Amino acid sequence: MFSSTKRGLVAGALVPMFLLASCGGGDSAEGAAGVEEFVTIGTGGTGGAYYPIGGAMGSMLAREIDGVNSGTAETTGGSVENLQLLGRGDVTLAMAMNDAVYNAVNGEGDFDQPLDVCTIGVMYPNILQVVTTEDAGISSFQDFTGKNVSVGDAGSATELMFQNVVETLGMSFDDFGKAQHLPFDAQTTAIRNNQLDVGAWVVAPGASSIQDLASSEDIKVVPLDQASLDKVTSEYPYYIATELEAGTYDGQDGAVPVAATWNSLLMSKSANQDFVADVTRAVHENVDELAEAQPAAGEIAPENVEDAVAPVCEGSMRYFEEAGVEIPEEVRPN
């Protein structure tokens, strides 16, 4: 607990984007000392990890920071949309994968110009989990040719990472029999109903929508061999090689080699930096609470900020310096 705290005020809620829009949720109001009374957090679909973490974070911020009356998690298309919303000032915080963050701060990919956003923390790695069923006859990415594949929600970081990996391996979405843009829960339903051969998820291990699919189907997470991982991580320095641990899902008996990227938590450079400092401290000092909503949040730690790709917020620097974290020169506030 820190100086600007309170108890017993309104907790956060999980609110879909269209409801927030209908009640003016996209416009943040600032109270005393630049504190936003109504904090909004860009998350993702309900079947991923961002959404429950954002809900718990909203509740926690409403309790911990004096002047914050409510904190809401907005359902969105994921990282790219979250960053666009943050750039327009339509959300207070954004969760986003580092590949999308890199593009946002450099004005590349889906971003026509650089966004003035900054990092308040780096959370946990998101893993590219490309899921099929055992009877689909798919053993590698090369087997996607001619198959019905969902590449993730349109404009999401799942789509971005999956496309980057596929193209690095010398393929494209045009090689698929049909490339669809489905949200996570819809991918689960379509695979279960034999309407889809492959679905792409870029999420934390143990995603609820994949767990749901594994409860009724013999699933397979498609591996990347070492040569493929070497190509991907050489081409994109914000991607890392890792493993999906055995037993993450029902029937998944062995570890699966996969690619991953860190998730960052960001705010606008124009936000009041005293408020940013308080948000940074609250997030890092209430990790256990966030992990109760989604275990992946338990990996949030101050030292993770060394893997940031967007500059660290000036207000956040105060907390990290107190915590004794060395911030790389290339991501110090500019």
Image (cartoon, rainbow, N blue to C red):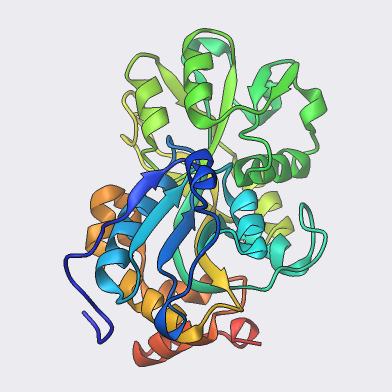
Question: Does 301 appear above or below 77?
Answer: below
Between residues 52 and 246, which one lies in front from this camera angle?
52
Q: Where is residue 253 in the image (x, y as percent from the top left)?
A: 34, 29
Q: Where is residue 113 in the image (x, y as percent from the top left)?
A: 81, 65
Between residues 48 and 167, which one lies in front from this camera angle?
48
Name the residue: 25% across, 87% down.
Answer: 3
Judge from the rendering whether residue 168 lies leftward or rightward of residue 184; answer left or right. Answer: right
Question: Does 69 appear above or below 23?
Answer: below
In which quadrant is the N terminus drawn? bottom left
- Most extreme residue toward the front, as rendered? 23
Judge from the rendering whether residue 332 lies leftward or rightward of residue 172; answer left or right. Answer: left
Between residues 31 and 89, which one lies in front from this camera angle?
31
Question: Does 308 appear above or below 242?
Answer: below
Mark yes or no: residue 285 visible.
Answer: no
Name the residue: 43% across, 37% down.
Answer: 46
Name the residue: 49% across, 53% down.
Answer: 25
Residue 33 lies in quadrant: bottom left
